[in-house]
Amino acid sequence: MSQHGTLILIMAIAVLAPLLAYGTGRWLPVPIVVFEILLGVLIGPDVLGWTQRNEVIDVLADLGLTMLIFLAGYEIDFAAVRGATLRRSIIAWVLSLAVGLGIALVLTGAQLNPSFVIGTALTSTALGAVLPMLRDSGQLHGRFGTAVLAFGAVGEFGPVIAITLLLSGRDPGTSTVLLIAFAAVTAAAVFWALRPRPPWFSRLVATTLHSSGQFAIRFVMLVLAAMLGLSSAFGLDTLLGAFAAGVLIRLVLRGSSPDDSTEVLGRIEALGFGFLVPLFYVVTGIEFDLEALRADPRALLLLPAFLLLFLLVRGLPAFLLAPPDLHRRDRAALACYGSTCLPLVVAITTIGLDDRTVEPAVAAALVGAAMLSVLGFPLLARALRSPGEQTRTARPRFDEEAESW
C-alpha cells in the first residue's frame, strides 16, 4: 500500500478507536489506546499485511511520541507534587532502577549493555498514556491524582535520564557533564518563564487566539522545537527536551488569563490527541514484531515474565512508598498505573536494537509486555478503586512538608 493509503488507514483506525471505546464503555471501560494498538497489530505486516513502514509515517509517529511526552510534562503541577510525595516518588524510582538492573544482570548473564536496556525499560511509566485515562474517568484531580502525577512524572523523567547516562554510547562522565549543562540551560529558561509576562504578551495571546495569527500556538511550537534542538545539540535524547518544553510552557502560560491558557492547552491537546498521538500508537501496533514472538518460544515465555516484572519492579516500590494517607486499594491502584508503560519501552528497545545490544525476540517480548500493561493495568487500577473511591478524597490530607516517614 502507498504511504498515502497507509496514512488514510491509520487515521481511519484513529476514528474507529473512540467509537469502539464508547461502544464497549457501558460494560467494559477499555482505554482508547488499547484499540489503537490492537487494530494497528491487526493491519500490520504480521497479520493482514495491509500496511508497511515508510519514512513519512515513521516521522509522524516520532512526532506523536514527542507530543505525548510534551503533554505529560505540561500536566505536571510541581506546586502540587512537591514535598514528601515527590521525595517518595524519587526514592521509589531509584529503588526500581536498582532492582531492575539487578534482575536484568541475572537474566542476561551479567552482560552490561543488554542489562542496561532491560533494566531501564522495567522502570518506566507511561504518564502520557495514563493521564488521558485519569482525565476521562475523573480521577486526575484530588489526592490520588496528585500521587499518580508525582510517581508518573518521575517514572517518565527518570528513565530518560538513565537513557542518557547508560545507553548513549558515551563515557558516563561525559554524559553527566552534558546532562548538567542541559539542566543549567533549562534552569535558566525556567527562571525566565517564572518572571511576569509583559502586558503585550497576554494581549497578543488573547487577540490572536481566534484569528489566523495564533501567536500562542506558534510560540508553544517554537519552545518545543527549541528544547528538542537543545537536547539534540547536547547529544541527549530528544524526549528529555520534549518533557522540559512541556514544563516550560505551563510556566509561561501561567501569566495569561485562565480562560486563554485553558483554550491554548485545548488546541495543543487537539493536535496531539486528535492526530499525532493516536498515530504513534497505531504505528506502534503496526511495527510490533509479532513474527519474532512466534518464531522464538523463549520470547513467548519472556513476555508474561516481563509483564510481571513491570508490576514487581515498578509497581511494588510505588505501593510501598505511596503517601501513607492513601487507602490500601488506592495504593494498589497507584502501583498499577505506575507499572503502565509503553512509549519509553519502545524508545529504549529501539536504541537497543539499533546498537545490537538486545535481540529482536527480547525486544519484541518487552514491547509486547508493555502493550499488555497498557491493556490491562489501567483496567485493574479502575477495578481496585470503586466509583465512590474515585470521587472521594482519601483520608484527611497530611501537610506534605510535615508528613511522617
Image (cartoon, grey):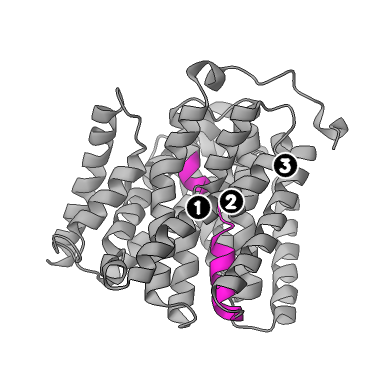
| Residue at x-position 17% and y-position 54% | 8
Q: Nearer the viewer, residue 32 or 71?
A: 32
User: What amino acid type is highlighted by mark number 3?
Assistant: Leu
Element carrying mark 2: helix
Q: Is residue 47 above or below residue 360?
A: above
Q: Which residue is mark 2?
A: 312
Q: Main secondary structure of the magenta part?
A: helix
Q: In the rendered view, does 177 fall on the left or right side of 71?
A: right
For residue 200, what is the image quadrant?
Answer: top right
- Element type at mark 1: helix
Q: Point out the stretch of residues depicted in magenta.
A: 111-130
| Mark 2–mark 3 distance (CA, rounded to whole Å) | 13 Å
Looking at the picture, tell me which residue is in the foreground, 363 or 33.
Answer: 363
Q: Is residue 32 above or below residue 300?
A: above
- C-alpha separation, residue under disc 1 versus residue under disc 3: 19 Å
**Marks 2 and 3, the one that precedes in the sequence:** 2
The residue type indicated by label 1 comes to Leu
